[in-house]
Image: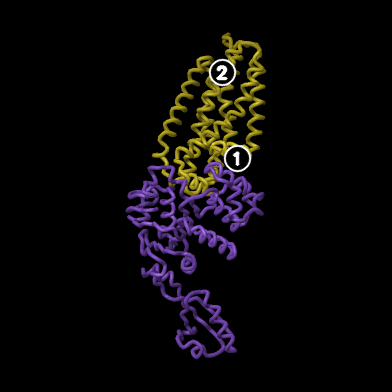
Chain colours: A yellow, B purple
Amino acid sequence: MDVWRQVFFRSMKMGLMYVILSLVMTAFITVSFGIGANVTNVPENSGRILDIRSLFGLMQIPFVAIFGLIITMPTYMLFVSDKNAGVLEYLLAVGMSQRDIFKGYLKAALALFTIPTVLALIVNLALSTSELLYAASIGALAVVTGLADVALVTFLMTGVSAMQRKPTGFNSPLGVAVGLLLVLPEVFLPFVLQGAVVWLDIGIAAVLLVTTSVLLLSVDRLIMREKLLP
Amino acid sequence: MLTLDNLSSGYNGSEVLHSISLEISEPAIYVVLGPNGAGKTTLFRAVAGVLKPISGRVILEGQDLYSINQLRREIGYLSHFTALPEEMTVTKALGFYGGIEKGDPAKAIETLGISELAGKKMNDLSQGQKKRVSIAKLFLRERKLYLMDEPTSNLDPVVAKEVRDILLSLSKDKFVLYSSHNLYEAQEIGDFVIMIKEGKIGFYGRKEKLRSGGYRIGLRASGDLQSLFPEGRREKEYFVLEVEGPDRVGEVVKKIVDAGMSVYEVKELGNPLEELFSGGR
């Protein structure tokens, strides 16, 4: 079995509470926003029509990323535990490179991310009474943004843990905070930019994906093999 | 089989091993001796392919270890750390590596005789049991070179002997590098000794060629020991005797007791290994 599958199942088992928490929050927020999106548009004081339906849809984008971050926290902790136990050292000995190892944890985190995301997409589409195409487009953007955010945070957290002499796993909440910060503008800016915020979302996702790709491609040079030793 | 060609290795660009060269061509147990910080673990990590050489090469079967990844399959590496996922059972932990290395966990369990531990979680095992499981993962499949960094530490004497017996049997047609602090263990199982001192090789050759001082003990007893041991001498409050090793101490004590005397104290005064490390050969 590939390393990433092992990490995926071990993370699920070790962090079952995170999985449950992420799914419950995903269901709650998605249903709430889905219902909110069906409210009739209301006028602002200025007389301008506030497109509540679009707002609720757009605000779901960062939340998918946030729930993705919650469910992937056990992966960062597992990385720390494996480093301290000498598992990563053994993986280097069997011929894996730093990139192979980081990629394994990254793929496992992304696989975990799909769990709440699939739930969010199903609920979202189920509650869309009309304009399925619009809901699907928003869903696709949410997946890309969440994927990019989770990928970068996973890389950063495993990287920071590797650089620490004796990591303890305290990085995990920090990871969620960093990931949250990266998508925070997407929570509030829909109120200002409305539909145009989609371009900002696409921009943020692109920057995160490019950054993660560059880091992953250069990880063999950025993080020396000895940094993965206990 | 294994050649180290001017190998320098270390951590974060800082050298621990300095231009080490040696050649291993005969299946046997090669005991790597050295004080703490001498570079034994770094040597094992460099040969295992965990650390990249700062300069020089590790050549396995005529090929550069870092150029051909497939060569790693010929090496089994036991580090200081158990390298076992703590939350797994023994069977699953060995299955984890079995999956990565395409090995057989059942064979590893059988070789180490740990079937009674198979269903237990790693977290529930003693340090000695974890060590046995950790050793077992080297037997997931056949290899040519075994690197064992202090394999008998944390093991009780009975299990330590079992492990040594396994290695002795392996060494008939495999290459075993075995690190230890214990000169007597080295003399018991090693065919060759590689002594490392300050990141360089202090001695490499057959163990018979390694000249070490005797094992010095201080004795206090109820009678005159000089008549029993004419070769001994008195130093302050102890009667000092030099014997071949710790396993000879029992004979000395028995001789004193048989002579009708009581033994008050037996104390180790000189460790020949320390003398070797501090004074070279």
Please indicate, yes or no, whether residue B152 appears anywhere in the rendered image: yes
Q: Position of residue A18 (x, y in %)?
A: 63, 36
**Real-space CA distance between mark 1 and mark 2, rounded to the nearest whole angstrom:** 32 Å
Residue of label 1: A10
Work out whether residue A169 or residue B162 is closer to the camera in this orientation and state it.
Answer: B162
Name the N-terminal-most of marks 1 and 2. Answer: 1
* Displayed quadrant of residue B276: bottom left
Q: Residue at x 57, y 62 (%)?
A: B162
Name the element at disc 1. helix
Q: Residue placed at 48% from the left, 59% from the top? A: B172
Percent position of residue B67, x then y: 38, 42
Which residue, given by chain and number where applicable, does mark 2 sit on?
A138
- Front in this rendered view, residue B207 or B235: B207
Kindly identify the residue that appears in the image at 48 percent across and 20 percent down.
A202
Q: Position of residue B220 (x, y in %)?
A: 53, 84
Q: Is residue A173 above or below residue B40?
A: above
Q: Quadrant of residue A140?
A: top right
Label pair 1/2, CB-CB below 8 angstroms: no
Dot in front, 1 or 2: 1
Say which residue appears at 49% left-offset and 32% top-offset: A152
Q: Quadrant of the C terminus of chain B?
A: bottom left
Mark seen at residue A198: none
Please state the chain letter of the residue tagged with numbered disc 1 in the rendered image: A
Q: Residues within 10 Å of mark 1 (few under 14, many from 20)?
A: some
Mark 2 neighbour density, 10 Å: few (under 14) some (14–19) many (20 or more) = many
Question: Vertical placement of A150 versus A87: above or below?
Answer: above
Q: Please say if B69 is above or below B167.
A: above
Q: In this view of the protein, which residue sits in the foreground, A22 or B164?
A: B164
x and y percentages locating residue B261 in the rendered image: 58, 88
Residue A84 visible in this rendered orientation of the protein: no
